[in-house]
Amino acid sequence: MKIIHTSDWHLGQNFFGYDRSEDHESMIAQLIDLIHAEEPDALVIAGDIFDIATPNTTVQKYFSEAIVRIHDARPAMTIVCISGNHDSASRHEVHQTPWEALKVKMIGKANMTDMKENIIPVDSKGWIVAIPYTNERFLNDEFYSKLESAVKEKTSEELPIIYVGHAAITGCDHAGHELMNERFVGGIEYTGLDEIGDIYDYIALGHIHKAQTFGNGRARYCGTPIPVSFNEALSGYEHGFSIVETEVHGSIPSIRTVDVKCPHPLVSIPSDGHAPWKEVIDSLKKFPADIKAYIRLNVLLKDSEQMPFDKDRQIQEAMEGKKARYAVTNPTRESLVSEERRQNAIKAITVEELQNLDPVNVLRSYAESQGMTFSDNFQGMFDIVYRNINDSGNENQEA
């Protein structure tokens, strides 16, 4: 059985105010070309099709039209699409029945009572076990044990079995990812690969944006087909589709990757680290006029230094006549450049830790990260506002 494995499209992403539909359309066109060339038995989309759970009508319509075009490229192909933590499970399932006419399986939830609904035959070539993102308290050892029993009962011994999931696997490389600590990455609690089970010939995963293979070559995050954050570019992510072939149940899968070209690459100036404002703005002026890109400016500030008051004007003048798009300025201070303090600055925290933070310190840290001075007068005004909000909240609770 041959499949194409993709995930984390993040359709509808609002990228610093920019619409990325051109990048997404290029990605879909390249996927259709790949389907024509490879003639796979199945396409699996392992979650996070949308960037948010409530995409607007235009984005939903585009997704539906894209799936129809993908089907038309190879009508015999089975398409399995599971929801991720960015998606709405109910939105995935609401049109399940009409989609099945095009051999499209939209899986928004793990059926806890009849797990066989999540086990999908791919003609006479193999099986796909589709488990979308589900709250971790339900995906326990008992769930995976029951699922394995259901898979063994429904499938044959000879045909390959592929698991499709949207999860954070313990030990995965999450460099450049956001919202992570020792328990979570990207808002999802870690799951051990051994918990999922060892009966699957290939485990096709979504959620982690860095493409990587592990688990003795039988598990893979295909990664994002196009970059969705500047940190992905800085961390050297490869973006593309994975082509996976499995001969028989028990065999080692063959995995190939095909790069996806993004019309608007994500470029940081400088590309490594931070630099003083003058160096950054001079580099921006020299950026080639004919290159389409989204640009982030990494600015190094002295501890007492603020961003220039005419920052926006200087950026606008530097960007004049260029096809690139300015996205954001990312400042840091010299005192934070040391490795220890840099790690502390970007360390993710738990909800409990967040609840215990002093609001004044949170605001001070944010102001300083933006190159602003957090004066005593500013703190005094904030204290007054904060007390008023607190008093109002207490009155509402008493009422």
Image (cartoon, grey):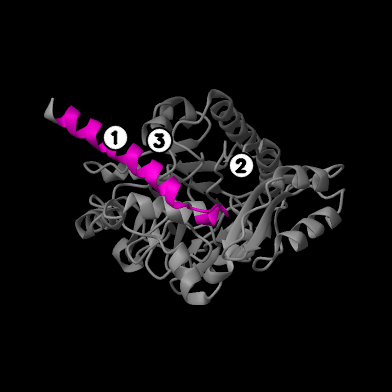
Q: Quadrant of residue 393?
A: top left
- Report the mark closest to the observer, 3 or 2: 2
Measured in 3D between alpha carbons, the distance from the residue under mark 1 to the one under mark 3, in whole angstroms, is 37 Å
Q: Is residue 297 visible to us here? A: yes
First reached walking from the N terminus: tag 1 or tag 2: 2
**Vertical side of 333 occupied by 360: above or below:** above
Coordinates of residue 221 in the picture (x, y in percent): 50, 60
Residue pointed to by mark 1: 388
Give coordinates of residue 131: x percent, y percent: 36, 48
Q: Measure the C-alpha gap from mark 1 to mark 2.
A: 32 Å
Nearer to me, 120 or 67: 67
> Mark 1 or 3, which is nearer the eye?
1
Image: 72 above or below 297: above
From the viewer's perspective, is the residue at label 1 or at label 2 nearer?
A: 1
| Residue at x-position 47% and y-position 37% | 52
Q: Which residue is mark 2?
A: 16
Q: Nearer the viewer, residue 240 or 112?
A: 240
Q: Could you tell me what secondary structure mostly forms the magenta stretch?
A: helix
Q: Which residue range is magenta in the image?
A: 368-397
Q: Is residue 29 above or below residue 206?
A: above
Please identify the quarter of the rendering in which residue 236 is found.
Answer: bottom right
With 200 as the anchor, is 226 left or right in this view? Answer: right
Q: Tell me the residue at 71%/38% (across/down).
A: 22
| Circle 1: residue type | Asn
Q: Do tag 3 and tag 2 residues touch (Cβ < 8 Å)?
A: no
Residue with the mark numbered 3: 88
- The local crowd at label 2, few if under 14, some if 14 to 19, many if 20 or more residues have their Cα within 10 Å, is few
